[in-house]
Each structure stands twice: as C-alpha cells, then as structure tokens.
C-alpha cells in the first residue's frame, strides 16, 4: 500500500489494483504549463485551487470535462510538475482501482505531503463498481475525507454517468420549478461532489495552428508548407486539438526540418 512508498523520494506513483501496490514513477511526463495553449482560464483556476490546497486552505476536488484531446490530462500533470518540489504528490488511479480508494486514503492521512488522486478518462455505467467509494472520498461518510487528499479527474462526460431520454420521463414542473427525476438526481450527484468544474472545448483552426507553431518554434522550415500539412493532418482525423497537433509534430518533425 501507500505506506510502503518513501514519499520523501517518490513524487508520483500509479496504483496497481490487481497486484495491490503502488508503483513509483521514475520517468515522469514533464509537460509544462507553458506547453499548453488555449486553456488560460482553466490553468488559472486549477493553479489557484492547487495553491490553496498546498497552503492547507479550503480547496476543491476538480473535474475537467469536455472534448477529447483538449489538454485535460496534460493540465493536471503540468500543475503537478509546477508544485511537485513543494510537497505535492500525484497518485494515478484507474477505474478498476476506485474500489480501493478508502484503504488507499487511510494510508495517506497522516502524511505531511499533499496528495492528488488522478483519475483519468473517468466514466461509469449504471451500478458499476467504484461509484460508492469515489463518492465517499469526495465528500466523506461518517468520517470526513482526508484533509491532505484531493481528487482531480478527467472525463468526456460532464456527469460521468450516461443519461438517457427515459431518465427524463419522471421529471416534472411544480409551480414553475423543475423537479428532476430520481434517476437524473442520482446520476448528477457524483459530478456535483466536485467543487471545481473546468470545461474544455474543441479549438478552431487559428488556435490549432498556434499550437503547431509553438511545437515547431525551434525548427527552421517552410511555414506555408508546415501549416498546410498540419491542416490536412487534422482534417484526416476529423478534429483539431492539442493532441492532434502533437501527433502531427511527431510525424512531421524529421521530414519538415530537413526541407
């Protein structure tokens, strides 16, 4: 468990659910905040929340939701990189490991470090394991959640659980006030436990090319050719995003830098 890790030396770890242990991360993804473009507001809010958390002030659990490839996971890693030398620690927990959250948190409570539990690409089907444990760690039960632990999660879904038309049938208006159906109330109750919601949207072509230019900033090449190929690359994938810009950079850097 977490008490077997020397957190003075280890800054990040991955919880291996099936083997029941924390794997220290020796090669940390060094993404930096300056590498992330087009998300200035999200940066500011997550940085402020994390700074409050590190100071021992009230701070929220955070849900970063929205379009794929728009920098949600990268922002969490970049914020961690900004503060990991100040005592912030990161533990990545996949969905299968959510059932272990209460026991994992128990081993962190007495530590002096501050811990972010990072849950990436989170979503649930109805009745799926881990929902109850995640709710408990977000807001507690009879026992308050650990003061030195916060959850930062990413998802493509704002409410984490799929909603259907059938869920709305029992909703009704009472004296002009909307009363949601019990099924909907239950589904949104999880995301409501995250005090900080940050939304991410697909970017336009100008923003996409700005990211491409940032990635190729140290490369001398024909800029007209670079932008044309970058646009074609995104068109083939049907989406513009920071992830697609990075994939284009990986594919084209060697070829275009010789042109």
Image: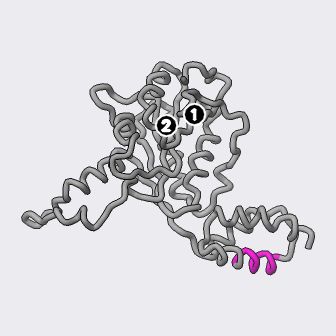
- When the figure is inspected, residue 10 is found, relative to residue 171, above or below; the finding is above
Identify the residue under disc 1.
16
* Rendering quarter of residue 245: bottom right
Report x, y in % for residue 101: 44, 32
Q: Is residue 194 magenta?
A: no
Q: Are marks 1 and 2 in contact (CB under 8 Å)?
A: yes
Q: How packed is label 1: few (under 14 Cα within 10 Å), some, or many (20 or more)?
A: some
Q: Residues within 10 Å of mark 2 (few under 14, many from 20)?
A: some
Which quadrant holds the C terminus? bottom right
In this rendering, position of residue 40 left or right of residue 175: right
Image: 180 above or below 75: below
Which residue is more in the foreground, 156 or 257? 156
Q: Position of residue 44 (x, y in %)?
A: 52, 52
Residue at 44%, 23% (x, y): give it: 106
Residue at 85% from the left image edge and 76% from the top image edge:
222
Q: Which mark is residue 100?
A: none
- Quadrant of the image for the N terminus? top right
Magenta: main secondary structure equals helix
Residue depicted at 59% across the width and 63% down the height: 38
Q: Residue furthest front?
A: 18
Residue at x 42% of width, y 39% of height:
59
Where disc 2 sits, the SS reads: helix
Magenta span contains residue 228: yes
Residue annotated with mark 2? 97
Is 233 or 125 nearer to us in this picture? 125
Which segment is the magenta one? 223-231
Residue 184: image x %, image y %?
Answer: 25, 57
In the picture, residue 179 is in which quadrant? bottom left
Q: Residue 250, image x and y in percent? A: 77, 62
């Amino acid at each position: 468990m977490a008490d077997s890790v020397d957190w003075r030396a280890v800054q990040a770890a991955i919880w291996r659910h099936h083997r029941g242990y924390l794997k220290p991360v020796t090669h940390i993804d060094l993404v930096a905040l300056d590498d992330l473009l087009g998300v200035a507001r999200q940066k500011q809010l997550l940085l402020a929340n994390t700074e409050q958390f590190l100071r021992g002030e009230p701070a929220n659990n955070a849900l970063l939701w929205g379009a794929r490839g728009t920098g949600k996971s990268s922002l969490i890693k970049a914020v961690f990189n900004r503060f990991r030398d100040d005592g912030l620690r990161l533990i990545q927990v996949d969905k299968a490991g959510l059932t272990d959250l209460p026991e994992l948190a128990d081993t962190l409570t007495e530590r002096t470090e501050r811990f972010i539990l990072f849950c990436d690409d989170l979503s649930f089907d109805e009745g799926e394991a881990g929902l109850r444990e995640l709710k408990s760690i977000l807001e507690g039960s009879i026992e308050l959640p650990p003061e030195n632990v916060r959850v930062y999660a990413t998802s493509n879904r704002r409410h984490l659980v799929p909603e259907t038309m059938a869920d709305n049938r029992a909703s009704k208006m009472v004296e002009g006030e909307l009363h949601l159906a019990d099924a909907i109330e239950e589904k949104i109750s999880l995301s409501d436990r995250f005090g900080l919601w940050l939304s991410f949207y697909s970017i336009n072509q100008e923003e996409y090319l700005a990211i491409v230019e940032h990635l190729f900033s140290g490369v001398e090449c024909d800029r007209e050719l670079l932008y044309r190929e970058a646009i074609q690359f995104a068109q083939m994938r049907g989406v513009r995003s920071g992830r697609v810009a990075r994939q284009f950079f990986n594919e084209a850097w060697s070829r275009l830098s010789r042109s």
